[in-house]
Amino acid sequence: MTGPAPDWQPRLVALDIDGTLLKWVTGLGMSHEEVTPAVHDAVQRVLDAGAHVVLSSGRAPHNMTIVADKLDLHGHGERLWIIAANGAVVLRYPPAEVVHEVTFDARPAVAAVLAQHPEALVAVEERGIGYRVSGPFPDGELGGTTIIADVDDMVAQPVSRVIIRDPKATAEDFVALAANLGLQGTDYVVGWTAWLDLAPVGISKASGLEYVAQQLGVDRADVLAIGDGRNDIEMLQWAGRGVAMGQAVDEVKEKADAVTHSVDDDGAAVEIGRWFPAVGSGGMGR
């Protein structure tokens, strides 16, 4: 696979959050909400060079603006573009303003999944607050406030994303489940655990990133994307250079153009440093 020219420099850097910018807390389905100095400095060099940094995550919008603040992304005077809910929601910040959203009728897909996993938990975002949930999720897996609600009520109207979680199952169980169900009219992505994101057909981080790139007048060839999860695959394939984190599953690494260090070794900072080197660094192996 031909890589970018040695003097290439991205005009847009799209970054996943959990497992890319933030380290996982061992044994828990949550991230350590702290940005390392190496990652913070690398992101600032991108901004200093006049390129755009776009956060792209499965998180809800209110859980992403917190990370934007930690990275000081809005210190260069321009409102940010943020891709939330795996591409279904695009917002500007600050202040948080949804400028693009795609919704779908989730009822058939939710019913089909619950028929196979009747004890699974269901969550739908309650914009600006947190989530409506069918029951308590494991600690730390959902940010914001959770409100117990009836599943039928949660999906009675079109939604941008549905989370289905079965703490008694495995990620492999959900990969097989989604493939076997077919889920007509709905796209899906399986997380690190038995976590299934249901989304509108054709919607992914790639579609959200394409929308943002069009608004900014940036060609996909000039985009660097970094991520670690199955929900990053489309984005890594769409970007001019898509890079998987070192701890990513093989399925993600195989679809990426390159693999960087793990999140524990500041892999995102290492990759960014290839194209936006610190003064006197010599380009970090460019």
Image: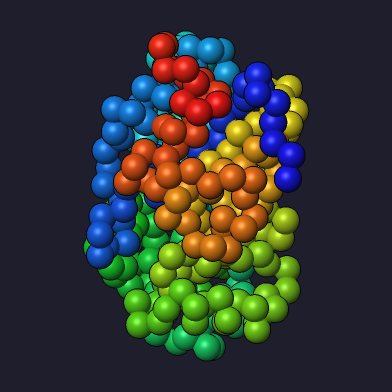
Which quadrant of the view contains residue 138? Answer: bottom left
Report the coloring of the rendering: rainbow
Q: Residue 88: give x, y in percent of width and height.
A: 61, 49
Foreground: 141 or 128? 141
Question: In this picture, is 171 found above or below 94?
Answer: below
Is 206 left or right of 267, judged from the image as shown?
right
Q: Residue 90: give x, y in percent of width and height.
A: 58, 38
Question: In this picture, is 74 found above or below 2?
Answer: above
Question: In this picture, is 224 found above or below 135?
Answer: above
From this viewpoint, is residue 55 visible? no
Residue shown at 55% from the left, 26% from the top: 286
Is 48 left or right of 184, judged from the image as shown?
left
Q: Residue 231: give x, y in percent of width and height.
A: 56, 56
Residue shown at 40% from the left, 48% from the top: 262
Q: So how many labels did they put on this image?
A: 0
Is 96 left or right of 108, judged from the image as shown?
left
Residue shown at 29% from the left, 27% from the top: 37
From this viewpoint, is residue 67 visible? yes
Q: Quadrant of the N terminus?
A: top right
Q: Residue 123: give x, y in percent of width and height.
A: 43, 65
Residue shown at 42% from the left, 55% from the top: 247
